[in-house]
Image (cartoon, rainbow, N blue to C red):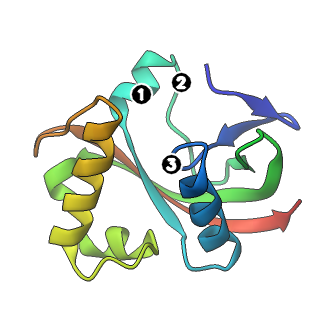
Amino acid sequence: MWPRVDGMRALELGTPDEMRVRLNSLVLSGKKTATTGLLAEYVEETEGLEYVGERLALLDVEGRRVATVEITGVELTTFAAVTWEHAAAEGEGDADLDEWRTGHRRFWSREGTPVEDDTPVVCLAFRVVEDA
């Protein structure tokens, strides 16, 4: 089960190090309005998918809430079917979909979960509704 903070499910982006600091700053600046997760992580953690209107606590590397985000879109798809629109909304500076895919494959492979084109993923869109 994912952590709960202030009565909300938590959103922990990337790994709890410099990566999370960078991703959170992109969210707080408004450049990052989307993220992608592996459906297998939801199954492993016995978590249901987020839903439009749900508010999540965006956590820092210490597990403290730095903002509240509201889910504006949820899509279950495959890794190969992620659109450029979604990938660009992740705000991480990828030049195109191939670069986004390469970076995400590298990340998940380092985390011990290599992805294939048919790997199910969850695409979330969100907006910041409150800074902590």
Asked if the residue at tag 2 contacts the one at tag 3, i.e. Cβ–Cβ closer than 8 Å, the answer is no
Screen quadrant of the N terminus = top right
Asked if the residue at tag 1 contacts the one at tag 2, i.e. Cβ–Cβ closer than 8 Å, the answer is yes
Dot 3: element: loop
Q: Identify the amino acid type marked 2.
A: Glu
Asked if the residue at tag 1 contacts the one at tag 3, i.e. Cβ–Cβ closer than 8 Å, the answer is no
Screen quadrant of the C terminus = bottom right
Distance of label 2 from label 1 (alpha carbons): 8 Å
**Which residue carries the number 2 mark?**
47
Residue 96: name its quadrant: bottom left
Which residue lies at the image location 49% right of the left edge and 64% below the top edge? 34
The picture places residue 124, in percent across and down from the top left corner, at: 47, 55
In the figure, is residue 120 to the left or right of 66? left
Q: Which of marks 2 and 1 is in front?
A: 1
Residue 50: name its quadrant: top right
Q: Identify the amino acid type marked 1.
A: Glu
In the figure, is residue 126 to the left or right of 98? right
Which residue lies at the image location 88% right of the left edge and 38% below the top edge? 6
**Which residue carries the number 1 mark?**
41
Which is more N-terminal, label 1 or label 2? 1
Dot 1: element: helix
Residue 80: name its quadrant: bottom left
Residue lying at the far left in this picture: please name it.
117
Distance of label 3 from label 1 (alpha carbons): 13 Å
The picture places residue 85, in percent across and down from the top left corner, at: 32, 76
Residue lying at the far front in this picture: please name it.
18
